[in-house]
Image: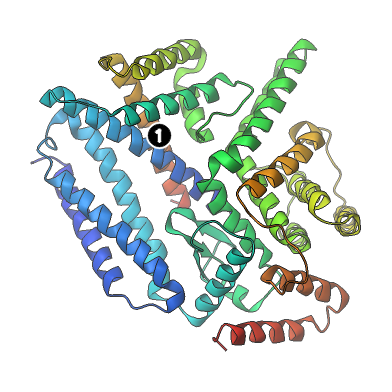
Amino acid sequence: MGHVLEPLLHDLAERFRFLEEELGKMVVPPEAEASRRQIHQIAAKAKKRVDAVLSDPDVSRPEFAKNFYHTYKRLSELAQAIDEGPLFALSRFRSEDRFLTRVVQAACGEFRFPEEAPICVAMSSQYYCAAIEMNLILVPHGEATHLLGWADLYHELAHFIVARYESTVLKPLMDLVAAHFRNAIDEATRLGWPAAAIEELNRYRNLWMGDWIVEFACDLLATFATRLSFAWSNLRLCARMSTDVFGTVKSHPADAARTEAILQMLALVSDSKEHQFIEDRWAELLNTIGAVEPQVFRIAYPKILLRNLAIQAKQSFEVLGLKPYTSNEETIADLLNEAWKHFQSHPESFASWEKDQIEALQKQYGLG
Amino acid sequence: MSDISALSHEYQTSAKIAEELNEAILAIKKARLHHRSGLTSDQRQRLVDMLGAVRTRLANEGKAPEAVVPQELVERLIGRHGSKMAYFLDDLSAAKESLSASSATISESVVSLLDEICDVADQTASSMFRRLRRR
């Protein structure tokens, strides 16, 4: 071949050989076996692809060089993602990870998650997050023994659904966003708004069509599947981490807008008492931190759009066959709602109650 | 809840677009070189859908495209074409039309267009992959 790509492809083939061998001989607890098998197959398939490129008679032709380079890059990223994600997690899969994976599996069954449940490991340095292509959820180390953040697992599970069922979940929501901002921009133009103000509308539309709509969809699904516990968990996260609840960053919409979307979904799936309770606590938090809604907030996050998104999302989740939260079924979502209720009413004794609940769950899973 | 999950989603979407376009371009180039049949009708249709999705996003129509196109990919294309966007939208329409006619030979201009979007999707995927690792 004699091209710069040749040694790189041989190096990549060796890396996939290593990954395939490691994953092939690895013995993992039953909770992680399906994941090990799946990632092993991905590594084996990728190794075959690298071998096929190496033996391709056209690989040294200059007119193909860029295309084979692109192939090399994607496969190289895959090798790194396997090494740093599932291989790392599976080779250190501990009792906490077994437990959390069982919790995730139970939650998935309860709200009819339409795919194989991902594994969940307690080794994140980035709060809760999901590596979608690797079917992996990561949470901080302490989460295996603390219940109040678990509703965020549903938000992470939602990322898998949103990514894998884009046409059912994401597309209708994006249609609503695109139509809303198209109309808003047309109207602003007709009314002679300054160019900078119209550009601002364009900017919001682009942010919505990027990461924002995905985050909203995931919040809406988590609320649909857990109701109050996700609303509480969101409130706690806002209290803990918000610098400006009305401020926006590119990757995440404003906390206040997310809370409003959660309230819109709550209005659809819970009774008015629950909805009002969360709304009141949110108002208390805003008062406490002295946050004041800026004028531009309603231009970026119109109430009507948030309401329509919640209505559409609920319909899409139902089309997918997902089950909304219903109380008193002894599910994980029930446990989380109970946890939040107990935490509100008896914060001083919550730690011991929580410990008992987690031990009972571990015992139920045969992991105690 | 962290940025990682949304980035992971966007990486997956960008990488899929880059891979699909790259495979199609390889198939077209190989067909030309070895005088054999190129894209299957399924491949052609997927390209038509993808070009349609990119066009819808760039044209800012009041609806979302059938297939999701990452915002960063859209922004990179806007950065490249800026004030000449109308011509690029015409090129996308022409390429879609050409690929829709299953018997038509795929012209050099269509390959160049596919190549450009493939490059942009590759850059987007690579950039997201690095951001996922904070590098």
**Looking at this view, is A77 or B108 the one in front?**
B108
**Looking at this view, is B108 or A15 the one in front?**
B108
Q: Where is residue A232 in the image (x, y as percent from the top left)?
A: 78, 62
Q: Mark 1 points at which residue?
A: B121
Q: How many labels does the image show?
A: 1
Above or below B94: residue A140: below
Per the image, label 1 sits on a secondary structure element best described as: helix
Give the position of the N terminus of chain A as an image quadrant: top left
Q: Residue at x 50, y 17 (%)?
A: B82
Tell me if mark 1 has few (under 14), some (14-19) or many (20+) residues whose alpha carbon lies within 10 angstroms of its own.
Answer: many
- Coloured how? rainbow
Q: Where is residue A350 in the image (x, y as percent from the top left)?
A: 79, 81
Give the position of the C terminus of chain A as an image quadrant: bottom right
Above or below B51: residue A238: below
Task: Give the residue type that dot 1 points to.
Answer: Ala
Left or right of A282: which side holds A363? left
- The quadrant in which residue A105 appears is bottom right
Q: Which residue is drawn at 88% across and 51% down?
A: A290
